[in-house]
Image (tube, helix red, strand yellow):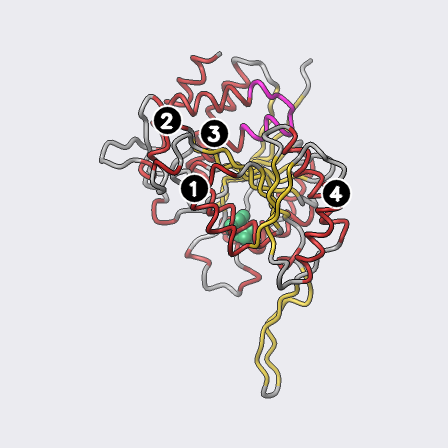
Amino acid sequence: MHKKYKIAILPGDGIGPEVMQETYKIIKILQTKLCINIITSEYDIGGIAIEKHGTALPKKTLLGCKKSDAILLGSVGGPKWDTLPSKERPEIASLLPLRKYFNLFVNLRPAILYKKLNYLSPLKTNNIKNGFDILCIRELTGGIYFGKPSQEIHKENMHYAIDTAIYHKYEIKRIAKIAFKEALKRKCKVTSIDKANVLYTSKLWRKTINEISKKYPKVHLSHLYFDNAVMQIIKNPYQFDVILCPNLIGDVISDECGILTGSIGMLPSASFNIKNFGLYEPAGGTAPDIQGKNLANPIAQILSLSMLIKHSFKMNSISNLINLAIHKTLLKGFRTYDISNDKNFVTTEKMGNEIVKSFLEEL
Ligand code: IPM
Ligand code: MN
């Protein structure tokens, strides 16, 4: 009997279910043509879970995730739930607890612009002649996202709000090691981004990363302040290899790198813990404006599956084949709405089918 690979599938809200539908087509090929014993189980999360179960992260969903080998998530949230108090909003009440529960402190967000597709980027093509390949590594379970106290306070004649940024040294050390190790597999360059001229958490961040870097003499380390970094990335993206960021800074930087590839509809992400248990999801959101219109780009979701296959199932060559199939489909000229500059765009479904076709050609 082949080894079983269990994936918990959480389509969520907005375009999540539509792009997941196309991803199932690739899973089907893995099961039928490549005979990989993948078992999928679907669970509710986010707004849909609030409607159906009264909570954004039902116990059944959490249990399903615990029993699986990896989690594949669509996206959560939408205007329907925007009026809920902040802590009950689908994304806050499901994504953040999931990250914390499984201790998913590593977040990899690759932003790749292929040479032949560089016209998709909003940047002038002469700045990015050869494309770029940046791996944003975001610390995901610390910093200002999770520090306590974090609340709005209204008492007597005072009304204020507070968030707390905390970084423990061990949290910085473990993410730094991941960044240096990833850099060794690539161009051996790490750029760490912080605000060490102002923030104490950043001063400790920089000091700790400098210490860890001594164990990785082959990797070239540099530091940039956050404000300067956002400029440098636009001015000269190809100078970067691995970009390492604290939680909030990484949220911003990964979106910036993302849009420079043309569309956040093409960006996958992987989050995992020390045991390599992972959650994989597109870096973009629920895109409520195009929900249900068969316009969404399924590439980010399919690339998230590809990252799952690589990091959780350790099947590098199959993951590469999926990536290749996507690249080939783009080179054949197929474009969804978000990456098309004319009216000749294809639907979500057609894009999914074309990727399947290219994938089958690779096998
Ligand atoms: C992301 C998202 C989340 C974050 C939100 C939805 C809480 O923007 O995954 O980048 O800020 O981490
Ligand atoms: Mn974000």
In the rendered structure, the answer to whether residue 233 lies left or right of residue 145 reads: left
Q: Position of residue 46 (x, y in %)?
A: 53, 49
Membership of 220 in magenta stretch: no
Please say if the residues under marks 1 and 4 sit with CB atoms less than 8 Å apart: no
**As shown in the figure, which amino acid type bears the numbered disc 3?**
Thr
Alpha carbon distance from label 1 to label 4: 32 Å
Q: Point out the frontmost of discs 1 and 4.
A: 4
Residue tagged 3: 23
Query: Is disc 1's CB within 8 Å of ligand 2?
Result: no
**As shown in the figure, which amino acid type bears the numbered disc 1?**
Ile
Residue tagged 2: 116
| Mark 4 burial class by Cα count in 10 Å: few <14, some 14-19, many 20+ | some
**As shown in the figure, which amino acid type bears the numbered disc 2?**
Lys
Q: Secondary structure at mark 1?
A: helix
User: First in sequence: mark 2 or mark 4?
Assistant: 2
Please say if the residues under marks 3 and 2 sit with CB atoms less than 8 Å apart: no
Q: Point out the frontmost of discs 4 and 3.
A: 4
**As shown in the figure, which amino acid type bears the numbered disc 4?**
Ile
